[in-house]
Amino acid sequence: MKAIYLIPAALLLFLPALARADLKWEQTSVDVNPTVTDKQAVGHFKYQNTGDQPVHFKSVKTSCGCTAARSQQDQVAPGEKGEITATLNIGDRVGQQVKTITVETDDPAHATTVLTMKANIPQLLELQPTFVFWQAGEEPKAKTISARVGKDIPVKELQITTQNNQFEAKVEKGSEPGVFRIDIKPKETKTTSFATFTVRPDYPKDAQKAFYISARVAGAPGAAVPPAAAPVAAASASPGK
């Protein structure tokens, strides 16, 4: 008689295991390649509930405030597909940016999943160096900055300006496409002087970016020297952008 009661009990224990949620991800890591004109990098993480019970999203959190992520729905029915969209605000960022999204669900087999988005952001313009310097009494010869445009970016001209008329600057095209030579020199080196030069490529025309070069003359011994600003290598959007 014990066996008659034990078999149904075993079945009752086994049957709930047959009904389960199972959230499958198409991929948990994506590479995105925004263009130099894009303001955002967007990655898509697709999923499907291959189980026979619904899956509920508890939370979707990103690794930094510059990235946002959202799911198409809070609950995924059995057999249903969807995706989580991750958006990185590019701003002044260049190079590869790696951001993670932590997803928590009530799927016991996959309670926590970490998604990774790798955004490869092209650099519009690289300046080397971004700071030039003259000692007091040094001959006021031009010092050269190399400007190199990013691969496949159609920059044809560079414009350079400064509000300090104690310095002069000249831009010349290099021997190969996308390479420029910037020569900066002071009018004299007896007086302490400091200037910031703004460099603007002619592309993209509708969202110009600015790059900066700092120049400084130490001046005569004992002369007051203004504090040097930190050289700025990254691009920043024009005012109002």
Image: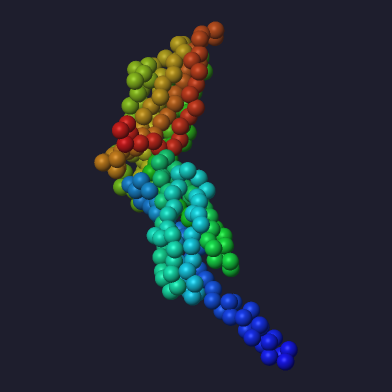
Q: Quadrant of the C terminus?
A: top left
Quarter containing the N terminus: bottom right
Whole-percent x, y for residue 44 in the image: 42, 60
Quick check: can you spot residue 25?
A: no
| Residue 210 or residue 20, whichever sits in front | 20
The image shows residue 149 at horizontal and vertical percentages of 38, 44
Q: Residue at x 41, y 31 (%)?
A: 212
Which residue is most to the right?
2
* Residue shown at 50% from the left, 18% from the top: 227
**Residue, x 47% and y 69% (percent of image)?**
54
Q: Farthest residue toward the front? A: 1
Q: Position of residue 147 (x, y in %)?
A: 40, 38
Whether residue 129 can be seen here: yes
Considering every residue shown, the one lying at the far top of the view is: 222
Q: Residue furthest left?
A: 206
As drawn, 201 above or below 26: above
Where residue 43 sits, quadrant-wise, is bottom left
Colour convention of the picture: rainbow
Residue nearest the viewer, comparing 53 with 174: 53
- Above/below status of 59 relative to 183: below
As displayed, is residue 104 above or below residue 194?
Answer: below
Q: Nearer the viewer, residue 239 or 193?
A: 239
| Position in image of residue 144 (x %, y %) | 43, 31
Q: Quadrant of residue 203?
A: top left
Residue at 46 percent of width and 32 percent of height: 232
106 in relation to 221, above or below: below
